[in-house]
Amino acid sequence: MPIIIEQLSHTYLPGSQLAYPALGDVSLTVQDGEFLGIIGHTGSGKSTLIQHLNGLLLPTAGSVLVDGLDTREKKLRKQIRSLVGMVFQYPEYQLFEETVERDVAFGPKNMGLSEEEIAPRVEEALRLVGLNPSEFAEKSPFELSGGEKRRAALAGILAMRPKYLVLDEPMAGLDPRGRREILALIESLRSDYGTGIVMVSHSMDDVAMFADRIAVLDKGSLFMVASPEDVFSHSTELLDMGLNLPQATQLVRALRARGIDIQHDYFRMEELAADLIGRWNHDR
Amino acid sequence: MTANISLGQYLPGNSVVHRLDPRTKIFLMALYIAIVFVVKSLVVFLLPVVLLVAMFLFAQVPASYFFSALKPMKWLLVFMFVINLFATQGTTLWIDWKFIHITQEAVEQAVYITLRLVLLVAGTSILTLTTSPIALTDGLEKLMSPLRKLRFPAHELAMMMTIALRFIPTLMEETDRIQKAQMARGADFESGNIFQRAKSMIPVLVPLFVSAFRRADELAMAMESRCYHGGEGRTRMRELHFHWRDLFATLLLTAVLVGIILLENLPL
């Protein structure tokens, strides 16, 4: 069953002078096991939107149903939060326990699982993020390196075995290698565990590379939800919103501006490269 | 949500009171407090009441702020009134029923004490309502600077206050974010008894302290790399200047204070 967002609106501090409408009338469905990218300029409502997916924020109007469970029902909230794992920006700032093991166990413990159930989950989660349990379990989270901290924090979410994983800029502030590792992890979660992924990112290349569909938010409303191909064919509109384009799309635009006729709206570098190599071979 | 908490309740404006030098305003508050404490009889109480109304009018502060200033004090006010009503000894019995004895003196005392508290709280709120926290610390620093001769760290204290004020919104935001991150992991801050709730704050407090220390470190480095070396020889962007209105306001309040002392002590 999917996450169904229907005509969702959210206003911060409603009724006060500081009332601020952050989202208006957004309808969107996150399918089982799909990779949904969310892009939008700063202040477009991305963070507000994703915080609705596990009931951290509640709709001012409209509704959010997670596998049929309404986030407004207080009794269901714990269940919803274990279904939808949420990884905030810089998740390493949430580490607090004395050992990595106990920190990772925090989520499962809150779900009410027994010690026997928690231990294998912790070990599995640590392995998933590439932290060897025998080496890291007993370490203090505060003595890890930046990238390790991020992965430990991620393990804390994965140990809850969420059906959907929502990530807000999961690669922010990481070096290229750290980025690749996190992206590979996210991809393997989806392919091996069928986890549905919702990822907010400023990197159009990452989104173009992995997302099945992309939701574009602009000033609190949904501009479009479509395949990367469709979305990046609206390159002029995206640029007007202050968004970037994937490198391949930028190159296509630049080549077209020079009079080179490329019909297809490429958004992945490999595909564009194949096309260009084909032309070059043909011309020779 | 935490976004609506206004700190120090500063109400931006351009009234005469707003434009007074912060040093003057701090001094005037001292005078005003003296006035409120010097007053002893009910008739003379009219003067500080008029003064308070005048301050609200000149500062162009809506009357609703009078009540919001008193709101956190309401139970203390009630408590003070009741205690004084029953505990004050007197000679003229007004009510004498079973164990309840209320005298005229007790009623007067209760009214005075309560009125005094109201005047104090509402009056001093004018200071924070019309002076931005930064101006206030600037004023305090200047007022305390003569104490530097006695090795009193006036500048350092003011700088600490400024930094603390500046970081309150940041830390509130941080708290909100950490709280949400832990809630997403199933943390529950709302149910359980007081001990369980206190314990449930640990996952928020530990990361909050860690990040506060990290920020302090970063700020110290940023300040040092801009050659901050304490107050010695430091000039300021906004110099404080006294104007005629500062002198005038000071004279006015001094006159009221002297007048009240005379009124209370002369046999009329």
Image (tube, rainbow, N blue to C red):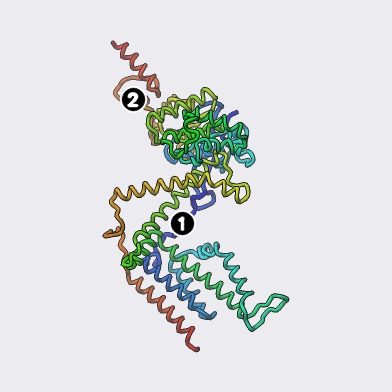
Q: Position of residue A279 (x, y in %)?
A: 33, 14
Please give the chain letter of the residue carrying mark 2. Answer: A
Please give the chain letter of the residue carrying mark 1. Answer: B
Amino acid carrying mark 1 in the image: Leu
Q: Please give the label number shown on residue A251.
A: 2
Snapshot quadrant of residue B59: bottom left
Q: Where is residue B71 in the image (x, y as percent from the top left)?
A: 55, 62
State the SS at label 1: helix
* Rendered view: A26 above or below B15: above
Q: Please give the label number shown on residue B186.
A: none
Please state which of residues B128 and A153 is positioned toward the viewer in this rendering: A153
Q: Is residue A72 found left or right of A224 in the rendered image?
A: right
State the SS at label 2: helix
Q: Name the residue under label 1.
A: B7
Camera sees residue A231:
no
* Rendered view: A73 above or below A15: above
View extreme (left): residue: B233
Q: How far apart are marks 1 and 2 (CA)?
A: 50 Å
* Rendered view: A126 above or below B231: above
- Residue at image location 45% in from the left, 51% down from the top: B169
Mark 1: few/some/many CA within 10 Å (<14, 14-19, 20+): few
